[in-house]
Image (tube, rainbow, N blue to C red):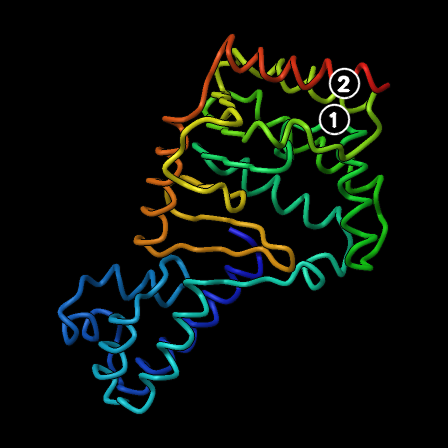
Amino acid sequence: MSTAYQQAREALGARLRELRTETGLNGKDFAERLGWQRSKVSRLENGKQTATEADAETWAHGAERPDAADELRRSVRNLQTSYRSWRRELSAGHRAVQEGHRVQEAQARTIHIFESGIVPGIFQTPDYARGVLTDVSNRLGTPRDIEEGVRARMKRQETVYEPGHHFHALIWEAALHVARCAPEAMAVQLHRLSGFIGLDTVTLGVIPLGARTPFSPKHGFWIIDEQLVVADTWSAELSLDSAEDVALYRRTWELMCESAVFDHQAHRLIDRARARFSDLA
């Protein structure tokens, strides 16, 4: 999880601990009062688990502070929908953001990806990544540490080749035709993308244009270890970790998977896009 997200969860945990301490009860006795396992109280106080709104209400009443219930519920809602402005996230430059993603991906065992308009960062070539990061800096007016960001993004790709990880990626065919760099560089990027098909750590599918789909490809998202959904908007990165949200995105991903093609059929769609850019080069 991102540093900002974890810091917010730890801050909530510190507030819960403060309320529990005011009762004079230790964690074991407080857990008994709430009818919970001692481990749950510990995980919540140490920022290892995200409280639900029901948990917040129970905690406030158990601490004999019903007046704190609204405050705790607001904190929980902020965590369940964690909104991080791209301008704020990129205030220190691209390298820091890319390194944060690298740590998250290295710790994960399974990642499900859907992208509707871009080649996923872990599959990008330097030229493609350079175009993307330059466009982001120009659009948002953030620091232009482009080369540092490109190197950090390339470093992320090491995880793709490490045993014990698996990336289940779906890409809408339209993303193959969105030019984020010069035509010759796009052709190289698409050749690179097709090279990931067949890796034992990657399952790569393409959703063809014109395929009948029971969904609209509204935005890209990543599901990390079935516990966290990360989705990008124009202005921010959204993190969702409620069981309901994770289940909804996982179901959406499964529907997308049913509309995708794989192996030689995916190769064919990627090669078709690559040939188009080669003709333009």
- In space, the residues marked 2 and 1 are separated at their CA atoms by 8 Å
Residue at 76%, 35% (x, y): give it: 180
Figure disc tally: 2
| Mark 2 or 1: the one toward you | 2
Disc 2 residue crowd, few under 14, some 14–19, many 20+, Cα 10 Å:
some
Q: Position of residue 8 (x, y in %)?
A: 50, 67
Q: Which mark is residue 125?
A: 1
Q: Is residue 38 left or right of residue 81?
A: left
272 up-or-down from 238: above or below: above
Residue at 68%, 28% (x, y): give it: 177
Q: Position of residue 73 (x, y in %)?
A: 35, 76
151 up-or-down from 2: above or below: above
Residue at 49%, 22% (x, y): give it: 205
- Quarter of the picture holding the C terminus: top right
Residue named by callout 2 = 188
269 up-or-down from 232: above or below: above
Residues under numbered marks 2 and 1 in contact, where contact means CB atoms less than 8 Å apart: yes
Q: Position of residue 65 (x, y in %)?
A: 28, 89
In which quarter of the view is residue 172 placed?
top right
Q: Is residue 225 left or right of residue 275?
A: left
Tell me the amino acid under the disc marked 2. Val
Taking depth in this image into account, of 62 and 113 the one nearest to the observer is: 113
Tell me the amino acid under the disc marked 1. Thr
Taking depth in this image into account, of 148 and 205 the one nearest to the observer is: 205
- Of marks 2 and 1, which one's residue comes earlier in the chain? 1
